[in-house]
Image: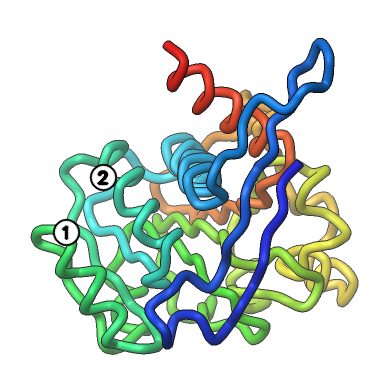
């Protein structure tokens, strides 16, 4: 059972906006086996989900990665993508530049973008982890061959990319069960007729379809997360601790 709290004013106090924990129960008798920190579970399940999408959909020669959002998830994305694309150069953009500076100082060679449009146009992979309701990623900025990874939106009113971005890209999700119907990133353009259900090509459950077809296409992956990932990640953390 995963619980979370959201306090938007926390970053100004030097604390994470989101907190919480995972109560992990035994399969056999229902006894409480562990209470695991929310951030540890979210770090690996979210970043791992997005990295798997990028390894399947991004160009293999991707060398410039832009991270939009300098929070806890942004840092885990830097670590995950750094492992999956070890030769890549990283840039971070954040609405508050001071937070981008703090993040960049933690990773050798990381650059800071002042203009989001310019940074998007230059990147091979764009990974976004922001809690916005008005899209800050514009489809007009995208160019052929890019991969877009969207993480932040989890409510019905939240979107990180605009209609043009979805129209221009081939669309993929981690799981239809966790992305359709309740996340605005997909639900809003579906309801408006901007995209059709058939435009969502595949999920991880159809690996043979989860592929890039050409070097020139734009691919877009929506990371919807889900309780199944929390459970698998929590169990893995506990098993590793016990080993």
* Residue 228 appears left or right of 148: right
Q: Which mark is residue 42?
A: none
Quick check: 172 above or below 241? below
Q: Residue 222, located in which quarter of the rendered image?
A: bottom right
Q: Specify the farthest residue to the left.
A: 109
Q: Residue at x 17, y 71 (%)?
A: 111
Q: Residue 181, located in which quarter of the rendered image?
A: bottom right
| Picture mark count | 2
Q: Which mark is residue 82?
A: 2
* Residue 231 appears left or right of 41: right
Q: Residue at x 9, y 61 (%)?
A: 109
User: Which quarter shows the C terminus?
Assistant: top left
Q: Residue at x 41, y 71 (%)?
A: 68
Q: Where is residue 34 drawn, in percent x and y?
A: 62, 31
**In the rendered image, which residue does mark 1 sit on?**
107
Q: Where is residue 33 drawn, in percent x and y?
A: 66, 25
Neighbour tally class for label 1: few under 14, some 14-19, many 20 plus, Cα within 10 Å: few
* Residue 175 appears left or right of 129: right
Q: Nearer the viewer, residue 168 or 110?
A: 110
Q: Where is residue 119 drawn, in percent x and y?
A: 30, 77
Sequence-first disc among 1 and 2: 2
Neighbour tally class for label 2: few under 14, some 14-19, many 20 plus, Cα within 10 Å: some
Quick check: 79 above or below 95? above
Quick check: 20 above or below 207? below
User: Which quarter shows the N terminus?
Assistant: top right
Q: Nearer the viewer, residue 200 or 16?
A: 16
Q: Residue at x 87, y 77 (%)?
A: 192
CA–CA distance in space, label 1 to label 2: 10 Å
Q: Using the rendered image of the protein, determine whether residue 213 is visible from the camera's viewpoint.
A: no
Q: Secondary structure at mark 2?
A: helix
Quick check: 53 above or below 179? above
Pair 1/2: label in front: 1
């Amino acid at each position: 059972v995963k619980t979370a709290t959201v306090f938007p004013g926390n970053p100004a106090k030097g604390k994470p906006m989101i907190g919480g924990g995972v109560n992990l129960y035994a399969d056999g008798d229902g006894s409480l086996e562990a209470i695991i920190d929310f951030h540890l579970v979210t770090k690996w399940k979210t970043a791992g989900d997005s990295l798997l999408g990028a390894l399947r959909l991004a160009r293999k020669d991707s060398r410039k990665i832009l991270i939009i959002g300098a929070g806890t998830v942004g840092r885990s994305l830097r670590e995950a993508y750094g492992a999956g694309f070890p030769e890549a150069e990283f840039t971070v953009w954040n609405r508050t530049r001071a937070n981008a500076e703090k993040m960049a100082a933690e990773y050798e060679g990381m650059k800071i973008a002042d203009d989001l449009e310019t940074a998007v146009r230059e990147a091979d992979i764009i990974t976004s982890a922001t809690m916005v309701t008005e899209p800050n990623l514009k489809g007009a900025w995208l160019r052929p061959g890019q991969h877009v990874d969207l993480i932040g939106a989890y409510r019905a009113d939240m979107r990180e990319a605009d209609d043009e971005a979805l129209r221009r890209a081939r669309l993929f999700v981690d799981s239809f069960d966790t992305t359709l119907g309740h996340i605005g990133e997909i639900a809003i353009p579906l309801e408006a007729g901007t995209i059709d259900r058939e435009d969502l090509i595949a999920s991880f459950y159809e690996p043979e379809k989860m592929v890039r077809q050409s070097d020139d296409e734009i691919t877009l992956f929506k990371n919807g997360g889900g309780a199944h990932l929390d459970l698998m990640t929590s169990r893995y953390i506990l098993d590793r601790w016990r080993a």
